[in-house]
Structures are given as C-alpha cells and as structure tokens.
C-alpha cells in the first residue's frame, strides 16, 4: 500500500485539565485591585474625610448619608470577600465554572469599590461638589463590569466530546478494559455506596449572600420608604442563601432501596428513586447548559442536580424520565445500580 493511500492517523482529542495555569492566577489577582484601591485611598484620605459620606441624592442634593467608618467597612469587606471567594475557582474541580465565578466576583468587587471611590472622593477631591454629583454615579454601573477583565484573562474551558459516535470511535485499550473489569468486580462485591460532593460555585455564592445579608443588617435605618426596601432585600438574600446552601454540598447514597440524593448541609431530600423504578444507569459527562444550568434543574422529561460541568450519574426510569447528578467517579455507582437491579 502506498504512503498516500494509508489511512490518516487520527488526531487525539485534547483532554481538558482543571489545573489553574499562570493566566488563571493573574486573572484572580486582578480581582484584588478594587480592594487595593479602597485601602490605599482610605489611608490617604482618612484624615480629611467627613464623619459621614453621602450615599443617596435627590433634586435638592444629598438625601442620606452613612458613617464613614461603616461605609468603609462594608464596601472594603465586599471587595475583599469577592476576591477571596473567587479563589475557590482556582481549584481543579471548579475549572468549568472558573470564568463565570471570576465574572461574578468582579461584578461585586468593581461595584463596591467604585461606590467607595465616588462617595469618598466627591467629598475630598478639589472642585467636586458633594451636593451636585451630576452623572458621575452612573460610573458605578460601568465598574460593575470589572469582572470582564478576569473573565477574558482566564483560560476558557474546553468541553470533551459527548457525541456517542466520537466516543465509540475511540479504541479501547487494555488499561480501559482492566478498569471496567475492576469496577464491575467492585460493584458485584458491594451492597451500598455513599459519597458527598461540594460545589465551589455555590460555596462562593453562599459566602456572597451571607456578606450581603450582613451588610443589609448592619446598615443604619434607611430614611423615608427605603426601610421597607432594606427589609425586603434582607428577606430575598436569606431566601437565596437557603436555596444556595441546599445544593452547596450533596450526599449521594445507593443501596438495595435505590438512589438517594440529599442536601448534606440541610439534610433535606432532593431526589429519592426506588430501585424498582430504575431501568438503566450509566456514567456520562454533564454540561450544565444542556441541563438548564446549575443547581436543582427540572425540565420536561428530565431533572438533575448539577454542581459543576464534569462526570455524572444518569439514571433512566420506567416512566421514561431521566435523572442526572454530578459525581466525581460515576462508573462505580452506575455499575452498582446495575448490579443491584440484576440481583433483585
């Protein structure tokens, strides 16, 4: 056979890695810049700042103020917590969501930092009129997009191929066969399986919700009709925190009764499926956007608990519905469910 007629050598598909690379670390470092700006300006301006800083304006000028120390503490705390929380995204398991976490953290840090720079700066910068800010407060909206810097600096996640034809075309080597045989042997020897999995994304959101709720709590009583708004905001943050914590860490159990997925923090059941209702269980790669996003997802004909992009367990029920849950190494629990079905 001529060289030209020989079959082309297939190009290996790159395996995505969750390891943080230098660009990812640099992207995270940029999220500390707003906190640095707050701390440096506070150190330079503190002796000249008034006892209270403006935080709301109306047609007549300053409508309300907050104590300078309190405003500094809240805004510096928000910028620092956002940057610190984004550090969870450097973990390998958070790689698929890393850029989104950086974008969200930059939103909080950029917005809080710009509010401090404007509220403090307008009282001390020569030529500025605290009673007439003009359109300058609108700059805070622009700084809310600060996270875009870290977003585009960080490496994008490359999803592995999920096309069944592509997966079937990959040759099975002896190592793969040995692993499959080992998993089958382990499943045949076991009667139960339990594991827990956490989500860096939901952990970071929980921290942000706690900080936000604390900020609303310690703020002084707002004037006029804004007191009711503050109460509603606090209630909304507490409700959001409960929903986030529900999926921040889950506990998965498989035994002769079937599959159980519970919130490891609150102990509430998220999904319980009897073994007799399961007709198939297999490992798959779960992409959040294909399942409607992150968290507990309920879609026509299927539901899921998605904590991150990555491996997961997919179960098909007798009624045709499908349930999926994120799990680090789904091959063993999938094989165990199949083994338990065969034994029942």
Image (cartoon, rainbow, N blue to C red):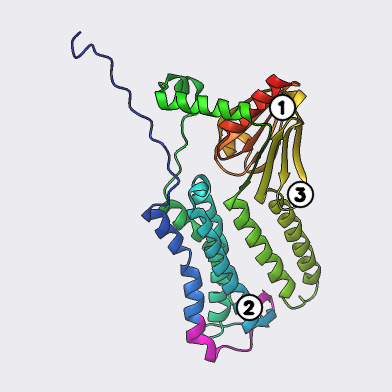
Going 29% across and 21% down the picture, which residue do you hit? 9
Closer to the eye: label 3 or 1 = 3
Residue 52: say if magenta: yes
SS class of the residue under badge 1?
loop
CB contact under 8 Å: marks 2 and 3: no
Of the numbered discs 2 and 3, the one sitting upstream in the chain is 2
Going 42% across and 43% down the picture, which residue do you hit? 17
Residue 237: say if magenta: no
Q: Nearer the viewer, residue 27 or 196?
A: 196
Query: Is any part of residue 125 visible from this angle?
Result: no
Q: Which residue is mark 2?
A: 71
Q: Which residue is mark 1?
A: 301
Going 56% across and 63% down the picture, which residue do you hit? 82
Q: Spot the residue most to the top.
A: 1
Asked if 23 appears above or below 322 in the picture, the reply is below
SS class of the residue under badge 3?
loop
Q: Which residue is mark 3?
A: 267
- The quadrant of the image that shows the N terminus is top left
Q: Nearer the viewer, residue 337 or 201?
A: 337
Q: Quadrant of residue 78?
A: bottom right
SS class of the residue under badge 2?
helix
* Stretch of the chain drawn in magenta: 42-61
Of the numbered discs 3 and 1, the one sitting upstream in the chain is 3
Residue 83 in the image: state x and y as whole percent.
52, 64
Q: Spot the residue most to the left.
A: 2
Q: Nearer the viewer, residue 21 or 115?
A: 21
Could you tell me how far apart the alpha carbons at marks 3 and 1 are, in whole angstroms?
Answer: 26 Å
Residue 91 in the image: state x and y as whole percent.
49, 52
Could you tell me how far apart the alpha carbons at marks 1 and 2 are, in whole angstroms?
Answer: 49 Å
Of the numbered discs 1 and 2, the one sitting upstream in the chain is 2
Closer to the eye: label 2 or 3 = 3
């Amino acid at each position: 056979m001529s060289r030209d007629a020989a079959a082309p050598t297939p190009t290996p598909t790159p395996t995505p890695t969750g390891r943080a690379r230098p660009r990812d670390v640099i992207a995270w470092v940029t999220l500390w810049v707003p906190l640095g700006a707050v701390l440096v300006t506070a150190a330079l301006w503190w002796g000249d700042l008034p006892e209270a800083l403006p935080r709301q304006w109306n047609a007549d000028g300053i409508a309300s103020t907050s104590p300078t120390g309190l405003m500094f503490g809240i805004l510096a705390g928000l910028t620092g917590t956002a940057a610190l929380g984004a550090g969870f995204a450097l973990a390998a398991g958070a790689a698929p969501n890393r850029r989104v976490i950086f974008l969200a953290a930059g939103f909080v840090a950029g917005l809080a930092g710009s509010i401090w720079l404007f509220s403090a700066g307008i009282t001390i910068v020569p030529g500025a009129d605290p009673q007439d800010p003009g359109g300058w407060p609108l700059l805070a909206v622009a700084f809310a997009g600060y996270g875009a810097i870290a977003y585009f600096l960080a490496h994008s996640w490359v999803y592995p191929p999920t096309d069944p034809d592509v997966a079937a075309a990959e040759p099975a080597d002896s190592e793969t066969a040995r692993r499959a045989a080992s998993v089958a042997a382990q499943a045949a020897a076991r009667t139960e399986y339990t594991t827990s999995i956490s989500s860096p994304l939901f952990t970071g959101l929980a921290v942000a919700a706690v900080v936000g709720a604390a900020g609303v709590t310690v703020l002084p009583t707002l004037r006029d009709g804004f007191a009711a708004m503050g109460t509603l905001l606090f209630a909304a943050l507490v409700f959001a925190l409960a929903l986030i914590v529900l999926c921040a860490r889950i506990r998965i159990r498989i035994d002769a009764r079937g599959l159980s997925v519970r919130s490891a923090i609150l102990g509430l059941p998220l999904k319980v499926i009897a073994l007799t209702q399961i007709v198939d269980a297999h490992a798959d790669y779960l992409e959040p956007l294909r399942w409607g996003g992150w968290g507990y997802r309920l879609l026509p004909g299927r539901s899921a608990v998605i904590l991150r992009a990555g491996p997961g367990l997919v179960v098909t029920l007798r009624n045709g519905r499908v349930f999926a849950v994120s799990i680090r190494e789904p091959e063993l629990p999938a094989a165990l469910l199949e083994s338990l079905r065969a034994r029942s």
